[in-house]
Amino acid sequence: MDVHNEVGTGLKASLLMFVLILVGTLVYFVVRQNSELIQIYAAQDVDAIVIHRSAPAKIDSTLPAP
């Protein structure tokens, strides 16, 4: 006997679409969060370079004063 259960097939298709949308949404948010973290770390690197360059030079106390 060949019985087609259309309700079961429709339910499987609906669940598959739900899972695909859920996975796609999660991937989108992970990628978005990752790009925001990259921007934050890049800004911190720039701030560290600016602070390092603006710091006064260290004075070597082993040399005699002129």
Image (tube, grey):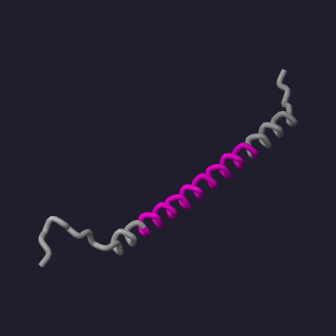
Q: Nearer the viewer, residue 21 or 49?
A: 49
Q: Nearer the viewer, residue 31 or 37?
A: 37
Left/right placement of residue 66 relative to residue 42 reads left
Q: Quadrant of the C terminus?
A: bottom left
Outermost residue, bottom side: 66
Outermost residue, front side: 65
Residue 12 pos. (x, y %): 78, 37
Q: Which residue is pictured at 14% across the width and 75% down the height?
A: 65
Left/right placement of residue 17 relative to residue 33 reads right
Q: Nearer the viewer, residue 53 or 10?
A: 53
Residue 45 pos. (x, y %): 42, 64
Q: Which residue is pictured at 84% across the width and 33% down the height?
A: 8
Residue 3 pos. (x, y %): 85, 26
- Prevailing SS of the magenta stretch: helix
Q: Which residue is pictured at 87% across the width and 36% down the height?
A: 7
Residue 47 pos. (x, y %): 44, 69
Left/right placement of residue 4 relative to residue 24 reads right
Left/right placement of residue 38 relative to residue 28 reads left
Quarter where residue 36 is shown: bottom right
Q: Which residues are magenta?
A: 18-47
Quarter where residue 31 is shown: bottom right
* Residue 40 is covered by the magenta coloring: yes
Question: Does residue 45 lie above or below 65 as drawn?
Answer: above
* Residue 20 is covered by the magenta coloring: yes
Outermost residue, top side: 1
Question: Does residue 20 lie above or below 63 as drawn?
Answer: above
